[in-house]
Every structure is written in C-alpha cells, then in structure tokens.
C-alpha cells in the first residue's frame, strides 16, 4: 500500500517543460521620442542651436538632449535649406534605426541675415518656433505664439531713491503699466522684458535739488530696448520720507515712455491688438 501511494503522488507532479532555455532572454525596446530625443544640426546653422532647441523642448516635456548621440534613440535633425529668396531649417525626425519617420517641419529664417550669425532676439524666435514645431510633430500642443510674443514685464526695486521711493516707485509704475493693458509679473521668471528704475539727486542749491529718474527697458536676454529720463526740481529733502501720490505722478510718465518703446520694438503685436 505504501509503494502504490508513492507512485500516485509522483504521477500528480507537473511534467518538466521541454526546450526551456537555462537563462531567460530579454529585449529592450528603444524609448519613445518624447522620452529620449537627440537634437542634431548640420553645418551653416548657429553653433548653439542644437543645445538651445533641446533646452526649449525640455520645457515642453520632451527629454531632449544634444552633444553626443546615444545609440538606439530617436533623433531630430535640423538642415539648412537655401532656395531663391528663401532660407529655412528643415527639421526631420528619424527612428532609432536611422529611418525617416516622415515627420518633418520647416522654420523660415530671417533674410538676408547669415543663419550662422542671427541676432539674439532672432535666434530666440527661431529656437522657440522650432521647438514648437517639433513638439507638435510628436503629439504635443506646441507653444502659443501669441502668448509668447506678448510683452510680459518685471519691475525690480528702484535703485537710489530717497525715503520709501525704491519700493513706492516700483509699485506705482507696475500699477501704471497694468492700467495701460500690459502684463506685469512679480518675478523675473516668465518675463520677457525688464523695467529697471534708478533715481539720482543733485546736491542742494538754494534749498532745492534736482531729481532724475531713469527707466531702462531691457529684454530678458539683457538687450537694451531704450531709456526714459525724467527730471524735476524739488524742495531739498522733501522726498526723504513717504512719496505717496508723488510716486504715481512720477511713474505715470515712465510707464507711458515704456509703453511707447514697446510699441516701437514690437509693432506687429500692438497692431494686432488695435
């Protein structure tokens, strides 16, 4: 009885499956283009264009990189195309086996500027538009061009103003700029223009002083757009305390000057809003 029970027990065990490898094999698929995308540019384009486009794509949620290529990755290549009276970058997406995916977009370049020597603001626009095109090719929403070109201002504390002028002048010109329909943000991040203010007092003469306010409008990349200067004679020491309504009277002229500089620097935007 014991022997028969043993055979019955072993007969119930699962049979060994034949042809099974001793070590399991694995296969790793290439990451998708939004997970790892190599950015490459050909000759004739700015040297740092690939890095700049990769950085902008990262802001759009694509893990893009430039520099040294990594095998088994999707990549996008920018090629300069020159035609009569027209130059543009052709961006084309390739799969990890270097096959053309059929996804491509063109970014027009300003003429007659040498593409390798674009001005900072021209390069910035090419980078943003290129990244937007590539993002859309890969299923993203791209960049809202209208929002991108909209003036967004940041006003830091005014330097050199007596009394509470450093703070009150900065606050007042922010209010005046907003009243003109301009967008003002509390920090430099997200702003494409910076309004820097400074104040300078002359020595006292016959109980009076001359105060000069200087407002400098800059792009976020440091390029100066223009300068507004205001001068006024005051009773000596009259602004050593609270500025009150005087800050708004001074800021109004500065804000109007900034607005006019913006209209000259970006006429297309303001024309579309008129």
Image (cartoon, rainbow, N blue to C red):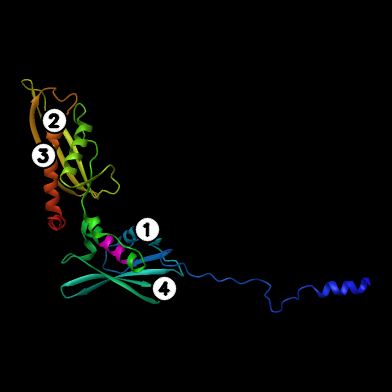
Please give the name of the residue rendered at 16% of the width and 43% of the height, measured from the top-left corner: 179
Relative to residue 165, is residue 101 depicted above or below?
below
Q: How far is disc 3 from disc 4 in space, using C-alphas?
A: 57 Å
Please give the label number shown on residue 253: 3
Q: Nearer the viewer, mark 3 or mark 4?
A: 3
Q: Is residue 133 magenta?
A: yes
Q: Which mark is residue 47?
A: none
* Residue 249 placement, left or right of 53: left
- Quadrant of the drawing holding the N terminus: bottom right
SS of the residue under disc 2: helix
> 127 left or right of 10?
left
Secondary structure, mark 1, is helix
Instruction: Residue under label 1, please give it.
Output: 58
Front: mark 3 or 1: 3
From what the image shows, is residue 171 above or below residue 130? above
Picture quadrant of residue 215: top left
Q: Earlier in the sequence, mark 3 or mark 2?
A: 2
Return the residue at label 4: 95
Task: Look at mark 2 in the image and give the residue it sits on.
Answer: 246
Q: CA distance from mark 3 to mark 2?
A: 12 Å
Frontmost residue, 26 versus 245: 245
Residue that protrudes farthest toward the left in the picture? 206
Judged by depth in the image, the label closer to the viewer, 1 or 2, is 2
Inter-mark Cα distance, 1 to 4: 19 Å
Which of the marked residues, 1 or 4, is nearer the chain's N terminus?
A: 1
Spatial distance from mark 1 to mark 2, Cα to Cα? 45 Å
Q: Where are the magenta residues, as a range?
A: 126-134
Q: Residue at x 37, y 76 (%)?
A: 100
Q: How many discs appear? A: 4
Q: Quadrant of residue 66?
A: bottom left
> Which circle's residue, 1 or 2, is located before the other in the chain?
1
**Residue 103 horizontal/vertical position (percent):** 34, 73
């Amino acid at each position: 009885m014991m022997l028969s029970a043993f055979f019955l027990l072993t007969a119930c065990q699962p049979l060994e499956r034949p042809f099974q490898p001793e070590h399991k094999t694995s296969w790793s698929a290439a990451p998708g283009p939004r997970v790892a995308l190599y950015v490459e540019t050909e000759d004739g384009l700015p040297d740092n264009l690939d890095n700049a486009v990769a950085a902008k794509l990262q802001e759009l949620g694509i893990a893009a990189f430039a520099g040294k290529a990594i095998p088994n990755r999707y990549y996008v290549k920018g090629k300069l195309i020159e035609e009569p009276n027209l130059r543009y970058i052709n961006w084309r997406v390739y799969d990890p086996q270097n096959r053309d995916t059929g996804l491509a977009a063109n970014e027009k370049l300003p003429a007659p500027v040498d593409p390798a020597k674009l001005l900072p603001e021209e390069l910035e626009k090419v980078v943003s538009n290129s990244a937007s095109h590539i993002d859309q090719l890969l299923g993203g929403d791209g960049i809202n061009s209208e929002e991108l070109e909209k003036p967004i201002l940041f006003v830091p504390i005014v330097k050199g103003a007596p009394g509470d002028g450093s703070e009150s002048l900065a606050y007042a010109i922010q209010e005046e700029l907003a009243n003109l329909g301009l967008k003002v943000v509390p920090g430099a991040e997200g702003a494409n223009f910076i309004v820097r203010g400074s104040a300078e007092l002359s020595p006292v003469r016959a109980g009076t002083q001359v105060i000069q306010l200087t407002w400098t409008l800059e792009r976020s990349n440091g390029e100066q757009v223009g300068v507004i200067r205001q001068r006024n004679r005051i009773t000596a020491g009259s602004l050593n305390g609270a500025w009150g309504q005087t800050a708004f009277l001074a800021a109004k002229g500065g804000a109007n000057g900034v607005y006019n500089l913006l209209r000259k620097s970006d006429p297309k935007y303001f024309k579309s809003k008129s």
